[in-house]
Image (spheres, helix red, strand yellow):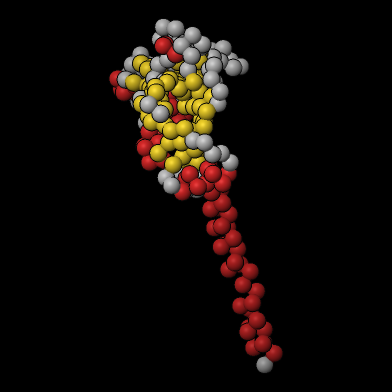
């Protein structure tokens, strides 16, 4: 993907606020052999670019003052409640230096698997993205995982999928984590049933209280009979 940026000379809170008021977003480009560079981007164009998955997980072509360069999106700071990008960070890409970043996982063909099609199971995506390390030329936009071979009771681990050439998974803790699990419909409904249990227990108690109320009024009904006996 390609985007256009412009160098900015002023920095500081006041300068950034004035920049945002004109429809621009302040940013910075760092890394590589160059010095950190202050930039500004058109906010509306940036807002639409951020909605695209490729803008977050692929090498970007940045046009800066008529010159091209390769960068990666590293950080985005959003306004707490307004639809506004307050600041954005990019990192320069060196073709000979390995990258470490997260890329999304795309799961396909689950509906064609035996687990879903014939055994009426539910496929649970445990991981939605994966940490990888690779050279810029080998960076994939996403990792596709074929789920057509899933069966009831199966779990798919990281080592069960094939990563693109030159790409290595970066794991912390478990060396071979679960990325997909298959559960039956009954197992998937158990958490919902457990959450509803307290409300169900409360209902009989409420009915018991309702029955107790008339019993408390019974002695008061005998009072008129006692007065008649005195006469």
Which residue is at the far right?
A: 230
- Location of the N terminus by quadrant is top left
Q: Where residue 167 sits: x, y (%)?
A: 46, 10
Q: Where residue 3 sits: x, y (%)?
A: 37, 29
Count of numbered circles on the image:
0
At horizontal 52% and vertical 46% (from top left) the residue drawn is 17
Q: Where residue 224 sits: x, y (%)?
A: 63, 84
Q: 223 above or below 118?
A: below
Q: 63 above or below 81?
A: above
Say left or right for 212 vs 2.
right
Say left or right for 231 vs 74.
right
Which residue is at the far top?
A: 165
- Location of the C terminus by quadrant is bottom right
Q: Nearer the viewer, residue 16 or 59?
A: 16
At horizontal 34% and vertical 21% (from top left) the residue drawn is 108
At horizontal 53% and vertical 20% (from top left) the residue drawn is 34
Occupied quadrant, residue 111: top left
> Is residue 123 among what the camera can see?
no
Say left or right for 214 vs 149.
right
Q: 21 above or below 60?
A: below
Q: Nearer the viewer, residue 28 or 66?
A: 66
At horizontal 41% and vertical 11% (from top left) the residue drawn is 137
Q: Nearer the viewer, residue 74 or 9?
A: 9
Which residue is at the far bottom?
A: 231
């Amino acid at each position: 993907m390609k985007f256009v940026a412009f160098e900015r000379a002023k920095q500081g809170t006041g300068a950034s606020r004035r920049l945002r008021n004109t429809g621009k977003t302040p940013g910075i480009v760092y890394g590589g052999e160059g010095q950190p560079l202050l930039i500004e981007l058109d906010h509306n164009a940036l807002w639409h670019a951020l909605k695209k998955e490729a803008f977050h997980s692929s090498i970007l072509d940045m046009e800066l003052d008529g010159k091209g360069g390769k960068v990666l999106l590293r950080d985005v700071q959003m306004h707490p409640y307004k639809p506004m990008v307050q600041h954005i960070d990019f990192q320069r890409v060196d073709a000979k230096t390995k990258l470490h970043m997260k890329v999304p996982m795309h799961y396909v063909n689950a509906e064609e698997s035996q687990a879903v099609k014939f055994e009426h199971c539910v496929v649970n995506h445990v991981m939605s993205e994966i940490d990888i390390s690779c050279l810029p030329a080998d960076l994939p936009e996403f990792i596709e995982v074929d789920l057509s071979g899933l069966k009831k009771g199966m779990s798919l681990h990281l080592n069960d999928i094939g990563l693109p050439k030159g790409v290595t998974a970066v794991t912390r803790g478990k060396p071979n984590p679960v990325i997909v699990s298959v559960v039956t419909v009954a197992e998937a409904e158990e958490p919902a049933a457990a959450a509803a249990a307290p409300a169900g227990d409360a209902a009989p108690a409420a009915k018991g209280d309702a029955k107790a109320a008339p019993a408390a009024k019974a002695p008061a009904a005998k009072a008129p009979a006692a007065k008649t006996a005195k006469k």
